[in-house]
Every structure is written in structure tokens, then in C-alpha cells.
Amino acid sequence: MKTYNEMSKEELLAAKQELEAAYQEYKSRNLSLDMSRGKPSQDQLDLSMEFMDILNSGVDLKSEEGIDCRNYGVLDGIKEAKELMASLVDATPDQVIIYGNSSLNVMYDTVARSIMEGVMGSTPWFRLDGKVKFLCPVPGYDRHFAITEHFGIEMINVPMTEEGPDMDIVEELVAGDPMIKGMWCVPKYSNPQGIVYSDQTIRRLAAMKVAAEDFRIYWDNAYCVHYLDFDHQDHILNIMEECAKAGNPHRVYEFVSTSKIVFPGSGLAALISTKENLAAIKTQMTIQTIGHDKLNQLRHVRYFKNKEGVLEHMKKHAELLKPRFDIILGTMEEGLGGLGIASWIVPKGGYFIGFDSMEGCAKKIVAMMKEAGVVMTGAGATYPYKNDPKDCNIRIAPSYPTVEELKLAADIFVVCVKLASIEKLLAA
Amino acid sequence: MKTYNEMSKEELLAAKQELEAAYQEYKSRNLSLDMSRGKPSQDQLDLSMEFMDILNSGVDLKSEEGIDCRNYGVLDGIKEAKELMASLVDATPDQVIIYGNSSLNVMYDTVARSIMEGVMGSTPWFRLDGKVKFLCPVPGYDRHFAITEHFGIEMINVPMTEEGPDMDIVEELVAGDPMIKGMWCVPKYSNPQGIVYSDQTIRRLAAMKVAAEDFRIYWDNAYCVHYLDFDHQDHILNIMEECAKAGNPHRVYEFVSTSKIVFPGSGLAALISTKENLAAIKTQMTIQTIGHDKLNQLRHVRYFKNKEGVLEHMKKHAELLKPRFDIILGTMEEGLGGLGIASWIVPKGGYFIGFDSMEGCAKKIVAMMKEAGVVMTGAGATYPYKNDPKDCNIRIAPSYPTVEELKLAADIFVVCVKLASIEKLLAA
């Protein structure tokens, strides 16, 4: 099989004609598919319906410690909810604050607090001369970048490798610039590539020399138990432990949520850090709220019981998700493999596939998909400022459509990638 | 009957001896009662138990508009939740954003946003030279003052009258000082006095000339349907309408919640304002979260159906609350009436009684109560910086203890007030 690069102009033109016919045919179907977000499908939501029955007027609504979960109080969450959330990432309950339904909201608040009040006693960032900066492994999660952009924080791209962020670059940057105050990380099944940070990467993150005392790693462990194949589970090192060992105990704010475990709108979010970091956070939190929804905390604990209960539940999610990933991956392999015009990593967990086209083709491909009725995540969204310098990365989100829809979307995607690539080659 | 002022030293000393014996007797009982917060009692929580059954695995979890409430999305709340919350304060649904479980959190975020990003396009407050100021009607709600103090906003006391804040003072201040950016108000059954703002007060608030274009009234309508006597309901003017009539449509952020309607930990909070104010808020909110818990929104709407449903439910709360208020008020009237050492207003709704002792006695009284095993809201808490200049205001919160406990607490309170007053008079 020839790669596209090896094909003559005539061969490319012939292929183009055929692809255009196929594309027109897809367009004529007036499709309307949404692959834009990492949104669980209705099938997945249906897995958790017993979650709706676990609390009712006939059951005791007191926590293990005898707290009436209906009433005010308990700023940082009931004991058993802390235990459950801690267990998901091998933390201890005293390292946990339970929040409301959105870990994004916790991350936003954490950045906002640092700006207005500093980090564990440091100078509030808004009082500093010069611009605060964050390191952003790329491609990465658009909503992380939206938070830092919103607050005027300068974002610095750091390329991802198959082991996580390029640590040579990270180490040099954080050691040399005290205005670098943070770094976004999705360490397990990264968004969008599904990369798992290696032990070496995590140890270097924990041990690296950092110029800013108030530097924190924003460790969004969004996919901590989100395996696609339970026979091949990845495990990452416990960053909190590694930081403690390296003498940098307070370096990490870890975020975790059950949005993609139970119902996306009604999960629990938690922040995990050292007691000292949490104490500083609580001085603000106690002004902000009396406490989050403890009935939903109780509902979680009674439903899942413990980490094993969560993992059993995640297996059912995987049974629905894996075929969806396999369709996309199989269709891409079959249609694009060996052509030299695309690359991707086969993820073993998480919600996305990070796809790289030829340079300068991503926007074109996403636009063509849209014209054919398939909405994908906007090209560029995986980079700070929506600026993918090579215009090649596309985030594929297979979870929401049905299997049938995905099959069709994947076929169209292959056609669009090929067409955009040929046009690029012909124009060269 | 003599007032204490009319009594001779000998009479006071004789009374003191008797009161001290009574106080010692109470102390010997080793009581432990909590009257510190406006927390619903267990009886009140039990009123809403069917709220726990209204959603279950057998019911449709889609909103009226067909939105699956289990999944991500809907930043500002489902349509029917907006309708319900709007109806409580005679607003329209397009004036509503539904948040999570805490209106305090909404108020905090609203102030924080103004500091970091400004108000509907104004300069962010942190960029201004000079200190931002808020008007604080006193006595008032300690958690409001905690938010403004936390952010370093200067608080200016404005005395309350029986019609609401002293508007002569308010008008003069806001007209003359562009750094006055906000004013805390609890317009209906104010915390702690239970005062209802008069039509005249509300019209003056709506029409007054304000130096700061980004001035907002923080209208915490916490007790909008919280009547103690449904045969004598107070009604306040619709501030949004009055502001619109007066040509100041964007002047108000109104806050409302169901924390004291259903379960305090699991209610809905809402922010109510003009479409223009809400649009500015949503540019930030869309970065902060994907959306709040829609299942809890649905649970509310299915349980209460409409404002009439809420009012029917509030009648049951009143049946439990009114006897508690009556015990305190009756005991105080009987024990302290006519002595010239205390004053209070009889509230017709809300959660508190605002009590005024002789000057310089409030701290003493609260300390004596504590020594006798009854925790009250700290003296001074009803003023900014916890500084009650006359040391005379005490917030009484009758909701949480049982009727029997309250009877006892009220008796002890009368003894403590008398003792502190006599000591003050003897020392004079």
C-alpha cells in the first residue's frame, strides 16, 4: 500500500473524485450527530437508575457520625463520603474536601482563590507585578484552558509525550520562572489522548525544583477509575505520596468527581490535598457556604458502599464505552492506517481519542464533518487560546452517540480526513 | 410596676440576690441548648420527607422541555425550576438563574465576580484606587458581613427603622460616594429584627440617585414566604419592578433559596436580576461550571408544583415555628415587659427575634447564657466587624430547640437580662 505522499498527482486526483462522491452522498443524508463533548450516553445513565431509589422517606438520613444530612452544616463533607472519594485515588479521608456536583467549579474556585487570596499564605496573585503563568500540556482539556484564559493567566504550551508532559521542558521552565504558578495535568487517560503518566514523569513532577513557592500542580484525576478494559488497568503513582517523599508535600491540588461514574449533573466533586492546603482553603470556604448537599453525599455512599462498588459499576460503563471506542479505532485503522496522513494513540481508558491529521488540516476536517451533520469538538480546542499551531489535533468523543451513529460518523470522518489530506498535498 | 431605673439601690440588690439564686439553680442543671443559628428543627425537616420519594427509578427524569436531567448541561437551570423560583418573588422566569444548594454561595460568588470582573462591564473593583464600600443596615446578618469583610470591603453601618434602613442616611451616602458599590438588604422579615421594608422604603431604594454606576442592592429575600401567621401575611413591593419604573432597572441582585422551605442542605438557590445583569454573569458562569444539579431542580418542581404548593408547605412550618416564637416572646413580655431594660419587635415571619438590652449588656448576657449551658448567637454578630457600638443587640433564634427546651431557655434568658441590667445600674 502506498502512503499518500508516495502517490502521484493523478492517483491523488482519482482518489479525490471518489471521496468527493462519497462525501456528497453522506451530506445528502441530512445527519445530525453530536460527538463534541465527553458526555455519557443514555445507556450509561440507565446503569445508575437504582441510585434514584437508595434514599427515600423510609431510610435513615443520618450519617455514620449521627449527622442529620437534611440540615445545615458540615462544611467539608460527611466522613463516609470523604472515605469513598479518598479511596478512588488512594488518598486518606483527612486529605479530602467534598464539594457540590462539579469538579470544574472546584478548579475554577481554586484558581480564583489563589488570585484573590494567595496560596497557603502567599501573596495574592492579583497583587503581583507581571503576569501569572500556567504550564499547559498540549493537547489538553479546553475547559482547563478556559479557566486560565478567563483570569488572564498566560498559558505556556508543553508538548505531551507518550509518558506525559515533556519533563525536560517542564523542569527547565518551573525552575527558572517564579511567575509560573501552576500546571494543568490529567494524569490518567489524559484528555484528549488517553495518555497515562509514567512513574518517571510523576516522580519528576514531585521532585522538580520550582521557583515559585506557591506553585501547585492542578491534578485533574478525572478518569481515575474510568477503564475501557478491566483486564488491562493502568495504575499511576500516588502523586501526593511522591511529593511528600520528595520533600514537596504541598505541591498538589488533586480533583476528582463522580460525574462520569453516576449522573453527570448530580455527582460529587472533591478536592484532595494536604491538611495544610485544605486548612488554608477552608478559611475561605467557611465564608462562601455553610456546606454542600449532604443527602447526595449519603446517596453516593449508600449506593456504591466503597471503591469495589465503584469499580464494579465502572465495568458496566466500560461494556458500553469500549465498543464505541473500538468502532472509531477500527474504522480509522482500516481506512487511514498506513496512509501516512494521520496518527493516534489507542487509549485504554478515559473518554477521548486524540487524533492528529497532517499539518493544517484539522480545521478543514472538522468543518467538513459539520457540513455533513456531525458536530465534533472544535479544532484548536485542545490548545490554549484555541490555537493549535500546527492545526492538526482533533478530539474525538465517542461516548454519546449510539453504536450505529458512531459507525456512520467514523466512516464519514475517514472520508473527510482523506479528502482534506489530498487537498493539502495537491496544493503543496 | 417600677422600672429598674426607678428602683432604689436596696431594691436592686434584693432583686439581684433572688436572681442570682435562680441563675445558680439553672447552672446546676448542666444544660446544653443551642439557640445560635437559624436552623430548622427536626420536626420541620420531617415535614418534607416525601421530597425524598418524588424522584425514583420509576419516574421520567426529563424536564418539560425534554432535557435529560441526569446528564450534563443547562447552565442556568431547567425551565420549570426557573418558573417555580421566580414565582416565589413575583419575578419572571427569564430573570432567574438557578444555582446549587446555597444562596450564600451565590452571594459570595456575586461579590467575588464584581471584584475580579466588574459589574455589567464596569471596572473590576480590584483595579480601583481606594476602598470599595458597602452599606450595611444594622443590626443585620452576620454571614453577609463576613463576605464583605473577607474581601476587605469597608462596611458602613446604617441604622434600621421599623420601615427598613434609614433612607435619609442611605440616600445621602450613595449619592455622594462612588466607592459605595453595594448594600446588603433582607427586605422581608429582616435578620434579626423581622422588620418588613415599607413601600416607601422600597420606592426610595429604587429611585435614589447613586454615584456609582455599578452600585447594586444585594436583595436577600431569604424569608419571602416564611410567614409565622398565614392570616397576617406581609407583602413587599417588587423591587425589580420599582427599579424599572424609576429608570434604574439593573440596580438589584435578588437572592432566594428553598433551604428553609425543604431541606437546608439540599435546597435550590437562585439569583434574580435583569436579562442584562444575568448575561454578564453567565459569561463568567459558563467558565465556572457546566451546570448545577438538575435532578434536584426537578425534585423541587415535582414536589411543590407551584407557589401555592410552597405556601401550603410553609403553613406547616409556621405551625411548628409560631409556638416557639410565642414562648420566647411571651416569656420576655411577662418577665421583662415594663422594666425599661429591654426592647424587641414582634416579628410576623422569618427566623429571628432582634433583642436590645441596655447599653453595654449584650456580651454579658450572652456569656451568662453560655455559662448556663445555652449557646446563643455571639453578641456583636449582628454588626459589621462583630462590633455592636452600643453592645446591646442579641439575635434570638427560636427554631431549633424543642418547645420544652425553649421554655427553659427563655426563663434563663429573662434572669440573665435582669441580672446584667441590675449590675449595670449598680455600677453606674
Image: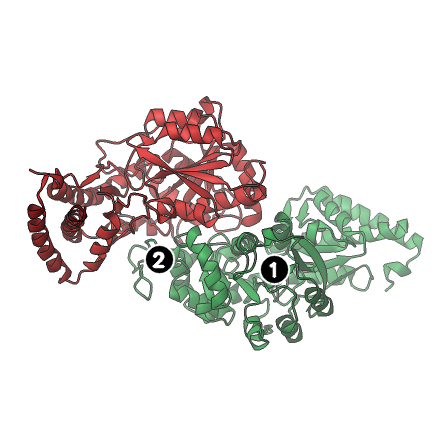
Chain colours: A green, B red
Q: Quadrant of residue A233?
A: bottom right
The three-letter amino acid code for the residue at tag 1 is: Tyr
Point out which mark residue A425 bears: none
Q: Earlier in the sequence, mark 1 or mark 2?
A: 2
Q: Are marks 1 and 2 on the same chain?
A: yes
Per the image, the residue denoted by label 2 is: A55
Q: Quadrant of the N terminus of chain B?
A: top left
The three-letter amino acid code for the residue at tag 2 is: Leu
Mark 2 packing: few (<14 Cα in 10 Å), some, or many (20+)? many
Q: Is residue B2 left or right of residue A294?
A: left
Alpha carbons under labels 1 and 2: distance apart:
30 Å
Residue reaching furthest front?
B428
Q: Chain of mark 1?
A: A
Closer to the camera, A300 or B302? A300
Q: Is residue B394 left or right of residue B106?
A: left
Q: Is residue A336 left or right of residue B198?
A: right
Q: Quadrant of residue A354?
A: bottom right
Point 48% across, 51% down: residue: B70
Point 56% across, 40% down: residue: B118
Position of residue A166 measured from the top left corner of the image (x, y, whole percent): 72, 67
Look at the numbered disc 1 and give the secondary structure of its residue: loop
Per the image, the residue denoted by label 1 is: A351
Closer to the camera, B16 or B70? B16
With respect to residue A294, does B44 lie above or below? above
